[in-house]
Amino acid sequence: MRKYIAEIIGTFALIFCGTGAIIINQESVGAITHAGIAATFGLIVAAMIYTVGDISGAHLNPAVTIAFWVAKVFPAKEILPYIISQGIGAFLASFTLHYLFPNNATLGATSPAGTAMQSFILELILTFLLMFTIIHVAKGSKEQGMFAGIAIGSVVLLEAMFAGPICGASMNPIRSLSPAVVSGHLEHLWVYLSAPTLGAVLAVLVWQGLKEKK
């Protein structure tokens, strides 16, 4: 249960702070700015890795959990409990934000600025790069592991910074699902459920190929 509670708390913090930054930026007429939103996502990811990483691994993302299972470093029996825990944390955060900002229309939900396929490809590549970093840091040397929060948080910040205005830079199915369901904006949700999962799995397959050649 310690692992599941850690995932609930970590995912709650991610969604509350990340989508909360988007909501407050809208409510304050741009006081936080796009750069501030990207920094918020990156910093909260880094903080949660250092906070709950030694308890649950700080997945905070169903795509990461599935990808770790594909990499054969995570047991199949833990997949569903982890995803349920992440869902509980995410929906608690979105419902809390809805209570705090009842007039906000989208609650930080992701949506394509262009075509759905454009955002699908962007999300796939973004999550590939994120998971490629995660798997190398997580399964690399002890020295690499010490910098996991900085490395992974920096990738989240970087990708949110340049791709956020087009696709939302979700890279996380539950990050998109909870605000979409609570706000009632389910348009294009398939993009944000499928692309991150596929991108994360592809990253692990490439990592396995590189590891074998090495």
Image: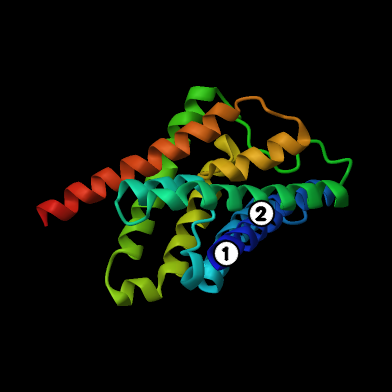
Q: Give how far across and how far down residue 15 sits, in percent.
A: 66, 53
Q: Does the image show residue 30?
A: no
Q: Quadrant of the C terminus?
A: bottom left
Please state if 210 lies on the left or on the right of 68 as rendered.
left
Q: Is residue 141 left or right of residue 167?
A: left
Q: Residues within 10 Å of mark 2 (few under 14, many from 20)?
A: many
Q: Nearer the viewer, residue 11 or 155?
A: 11
User: Three-letter amino acid code at disc 1?
Assistant: Met
Q: Is residue 122 visible?
A: yes
Q: Is residue 198 above or below residue 70?
A: above
Tell us which disc is closer to us: 2 or 1: 1
Q: Residue at x 77, y 48 (%)?
A: 23
Q: Residue at x 40, y 73 (%)?
A: 147
The amino acid marked with disc number 2 is Gly
What's the CA distance linking mark 2 and mark 1? Answer: 14 Å
Residue 34, image x, y percentages: 65, 50
**Front-lying residue, 113 or 206:** 206
Task: Pinpoint residue 124: horizontal percent, then vertical percent.
Answer: 42, 36
Q: Is residue 31 above or below residue 127?
A: below
Q: Which mark is residue 12?
A: none
The residue wearing badge 1 is 1
Label 1: which secondary element: loop
Residue at the location (73% across, 56% down)? Answer: 32
Name the residue: 48% across, 23% down.
Answer: 117
Q: Secondary structure at mark 2?
A: helix
Q: How many C-alpha atoms fall within 10 Å of the one at disc 1: few (<14), some, or many (≥20)?
A: few
The residue tagged 2 is 89
- Above or below 82: residue 169: above
